[in-house]
Amino acid sequence: MPSTIGVFDSGFGGLTVLRALLHRLPKARFAFLGDTARLPYGSKSRRTIARYAAQSARFLVREQGAEFLVIACNTASALALDAIQDAVPSVPVLGVIEPGAAAAHAASKTRDVLVVATDATVQSHAYTTACLAQGLRAFEMACPLLVPLVEEGWTNHAVTAEVIRIYLDELLATARSGGFTPDTLVLGCTHYPLLRPMIEQIMASIAPAAMQVIDSAESTAEAAARRFDGGAMGAGTGADARAQVRCFATDSVDKFERLGSRFLGQPVGPVELVDLGG
Amino acid sequence: MPSTIGVFDSGFGGLTVLRALLHRLPKARFAFLGDTARLPYGSKSRRTIARYAAQSARFLVREQGAEFLVIACNTASALALDAIQDAVPSVPVLGVIEPGAAAAHAASKTRDVLVVATDATVQSHAYTTACLAQGLRAFEMACPLLVPLVEEGWTNHAVTAEVIRIYLDELLATARSGGFTPDTLVLGCTHYPLLRPMIEQIMASIAPAAMQVIDSAESTAEAAARRFDGGAMGAGTGADARAQVRCFATDSVDKFERLGSRFLGQPVGPVELVDLGG
C-alpha cells in the first residue's frame, strides 16, 4: 500500500496544489483537508492560524496516516510552518513559500521579484525572508479582492480584469518608486492560479519589460515530486495503480464540492465532513 | 448602574447596528463582541454558525453581564437565533431579520420586496419567511463581493459601482421575470449601510419605479430603542450619563480598530482580545 501524502489548506484553494501534485505523482495516495469552518486564514492572526493549522495537521497524520505533509496554503505556510512541524514532529512538512522563492530565484535575472498574496501572508513578510535567503529582493502587496472574485466565479470577467489592473498598476508603481526593477511576479496565494491567464495578459500590457509569472502551487508540487521521484509515493502499488484522493472539510461540503472541481481541474468526488472542535 | 446591552457580530460589520443603537440609546451601556477569529459566518453552515454564535452569546451574558442581546449579524440571526436563545435562556434576544422585515412591511405598497445579503443568509430564506409572516413576498439574492469591497475600503470606487450595478441588474431582471413588482429593497447585511448612497443612486438609475431602501441595522436599533424607551437602559445613571461602549474581538484587534471606526462612525477605542476556544 502506498504511503499517504497529506495536503492541507484553510479552504479548497489548495486544490490547485493537489492538482499539480496529481500531475507529477499520478500513482500516489492523497488526503486533502480544507479547514472550511474557519476560513479564510488570510485575515487572521498568527496565533489563531497556528492553532487551527496544528489541529488540521494532526488530523492528517494521526487519523489519515499521512507520512508527508504539504501545506497548500500560503498563509499557513507563512505564519504557522514551525507550529505545524512542532505538532507533527515525526513527519516532513513542506510549505509553499520556499518552493515559490526558489522558483523565483531560478527565473529572475534582475534579482528583484514582486509577490501578490493575502493580507496575512504579506504582513508576515515570509516571501521577503525566503527570497532574501535566495539572494533576491521581494516587493510584496496584498490583493484582498482576488480570492472573493475567484470564489464568485468571475475568473473571466471584466470587473476582475479591472481589479487586477488596479492592483498591478499600484504594485509596479510602488515597487519602481522604491528602486525595484522586477522581472518576476510570484502568485503567493493558491486561488491565484485560476487568474493566471488574466494576470499574465494584463501584466504584459502594463509592465515595461517581460515579467515571468511564478505559481507557488506548481513550484511546490515540483519540490514534492523531486522528493518522491521513483519512490514509494510516486510508484504506487503497481504499474496500473492510479492516484487515490480523499477530501475532507471541517464545514458544509456543498460549496467545496461545487467550487472544488474548478480548482482541482477534475471532480473532487464526495467530500467527508470532519469535526476538529472549536 | 445601567444594565448592559450585548451586541454580537461575526466581525465588525455589526458596528453599524451599534452606531444606530448609540444614536437612539445615548445613555446605555454596550458590550460589543466581534467573533473575528472565525469570520465570515456568511459562507459557513448552520451547525457551525450556531455553535460559534452560542459561545459568543454566553460570553456577553456570563462574562459581561448583558441583560439584553442584539444579534447584529444577519447570518447569525438567520441561522442561529434559536440556538442563541437556547444558550442564554434568561435574556431576551433580538435579531436583525424581523425588524428588517417589519420595516419592509411598513414601506412596501406592492407587497413585493427585494433582499440583498450574504450567501448563508439567502440560503436560509430567513428574510422570505419573516416577510411572509408580514404578508410580503421576498426575492433574495446573494452579493458575495460587497463585503470584501467594503473591507478593502472601496466604498466610493468605480469598481464597486460596477459590481453593484451588475448585482442590481440581475436582481431586478430575475425578480421581474418571476412576476415580482418590487418597490422596496432590504439591505440584509451589516456591511451594506456603508454602500447605501451608491446602492440608492444606482437603483434609482436602473429601476423602473421608485425603490425604498431599508437598512436592517437602522430597523433593529429602532426596535431595540422602542423596548427601552424611557427605561433604565435609555436613561443611564443620570442626566449627564453618556453611553459606555466596550469592544471585544476573538482575533487580532488591529484590523478591528483600523476598520471599525468606519462602521461605528466614531473611534472604536481599545478593543479587548478574548478567547472563546476553538
Image (cartoon, coloured by chain):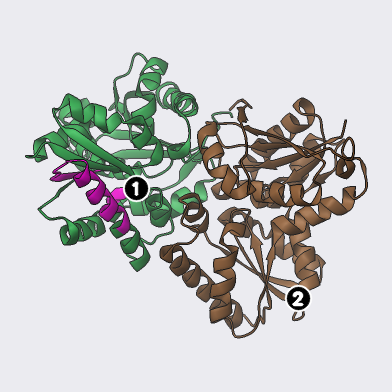
Chain colours: A brown, B green
Q: Viewed as shown, does residue A95 lie left or right of B91?
A: right
Direction from residue A67 to residue A52 in the image, left or right? left
Q: Report the quarter where the N terminus of chain B lies.
A: top left
Residue B112 on image: x %, y %: 15, 38
Which label is found at residue B136?
A: none
Instruction: State the residue at coordinates (73%, 41%).
Output: A7
Q: Quadrant of the C terminus of chain B?
A: top right
Q: Which residues are magenta?
A: B166-193
Residue A248 visible in image: yes
Q: Is residue A107 left or right of residue B226?
A: right
Say the numbered circle drawn on residue A108: 2
Residue B61 magenta-highlighted: no
Q: Is residue B173 magenta?
A: yes
State the SS at label 1.
Answer: loop
Q: Residue at x 60, y 85 (%)?
A: A208
Residue B130 in the image: state x and y as whole percent. 23, 28
Q: Is residue B163 left or right of residue A212?
A: left
